Image (tube, rainbow, N blue to C red):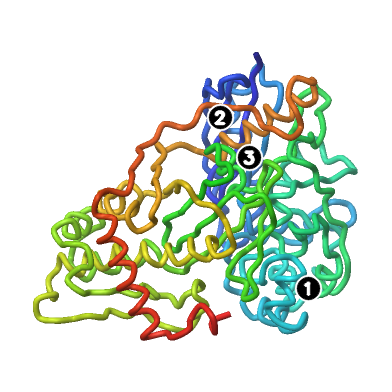
Amino acid sequence: MGIVAGLDSSSAFTRIVVCDTETGAVLRQGYAPHPQPTGEAVPHETDPQAWLLSLGEAAGGGLLEGVEAIGVSAQQHGVLPLDAQGALVRSALIGNDKRGQVAAADLIEALGGRQAWVEAVGSVPHSAQPIAKLAWLARNEPEAARRVAVVMSPHDWLVWQLLGRPARRTTDRGGASGTGYWSAASGSYRPDLVELALGHRALLPEVLGPAEAAGTTPEGLLISAGTGETMAAALGLGMGPGDAVVSLGASGSVMAVHREALSEPGGLITSLADAAGMHLPVVNTSNAVRALRGTAEMLGTDLEGLSELALKSTPGAHGLVLLPYLEGERTPNLPHTAGTLSGLRRDSMKPEHLARAAFEGMLCGLVDALDVLRSRRVEIRRVFLLGAAAELPAVQAFAPGLFGTQVVVPAPADYAALGAARQAAWALGVARGTLAPHTPPVWPAPSAQVFEPDEEYPAWQGVRQQYVATREQIHPGAFQTGA
């Protein structure tokens, strides 16, 4: 028996969970928001010292007493450009920074198109990716770019700080796979792509295996490899082959654990690695809960009221079909399109039918993403549904039939911090010879609500067919020509 901690440094806060190594039981928790900068903040830029300050506050009061190992999870899509002495050459670039859109497009063209990038690293550059941020930096701040000698992600940097800034810098497969210059298929960096973006090569962190330790502090505290938030959450949920996660934010994402790296010629799949030695192909949609919020505002209600209205209608919403492409769409690749409401008739022009069409449209858009993975032979036996909208009764009623699989809605928890703690327990066990390096410790599954497809499944198949027919009529061949 021992005690480990998981630290999740998100875009807004630090959360720490202290867990029993054997059972995964949470013994203590700490939380602190990142301090806000003084003066006018620049969007998508931050001083990473704020992460250390909130870490210190979250760990206060003896929270880490008795802890033997720590795992670090941190926000993805961040770049810390360092000089040869390890000092930042400018603020960290974080989040989905739209300033990088032109740079991402230039990178795609420079390598020869989307398929060339898919073949190189399993993903196509977009504005959030570190490689696009490096290209933006080279284009807009060339003097700063020339000083960049080392490139790190937020979780790499935090691990490095916890270890006292050693000469060795490390990352993990999961974090590296989201950079745009590391291939999950080959397990190797593409330093030539860093040079393409930045204008010169830079030192990149050593990629550790899932159960390897990044190092040990002078006090004897083991620090595991760490990983990105997405991969940590998957580890915290206990995902394995056959499991998928559908994340309901303003936009949506679908990811599944798979034994092999996957790609798709048009770049619909982002080929990520997970934190347990396997792979985590991801398909993103531009529209999810934003379609619900827009419909709720139109009807003068909120999400809960929209859910109540939708449940008063019937499958198929009396022929109404909403293609929820309100912000363009990534899956299918229709970046400049708009949403469509089809099937308006006098008897369908009622609030409850529009409400139901919004829920069915949002979920069918996510089924499109699931089908991209299924078309690549990804087995999906159950779907974890994450996000506040997963608690809406209409989502829970409609999702099993449309997804065609068991739907699990886990109890709210910081699964990224729990995954980081599980990784720490794994690294500690391997270091002591009590755990195998290929199998993470078995912790109990999180408490959850479970929903199964019911006897109305044929009706849900009809809803899906109605949606696909409408999509094909308005955007013919979208999944063939959209690539």
x, y percentage for residue 258? Answer: 62, 51
Which kind of residue does numbered mark 3 sit on?
Leu
Residue under numbered circle 2:
17
> Sequence-wise, which precedes: disc 2 or disc 1?
2
- Viewer-side residue, 155 vs 144: 155
- Secondary structure under badge 1? helix
Question: For the residues marked 2 and 3, what is the alpha-carbon distance in whole angstroms?
Answer: 17 Å
Question: For the residues marked 3 and 1, what is the alpha-carbon distance in whole angstroms?
Answer: 32 Å
Label 3 CA crowd tier, 10 Å (few <14, some 14–19, many 20+): some
- Viewer-side residue, 143 vs 70: 70
- Name the disc covering residue 53, or none: 3
Say whether residue 14 is visible: no
Proximity of marks 2 and 3: CB atoms separated by less than 8 Å: no
Residue under numbered circle 1:
197
Which kind of residue does numbered mark 2 sit on?
Val
x, y percentage for residue 331? Answer: 50, 71
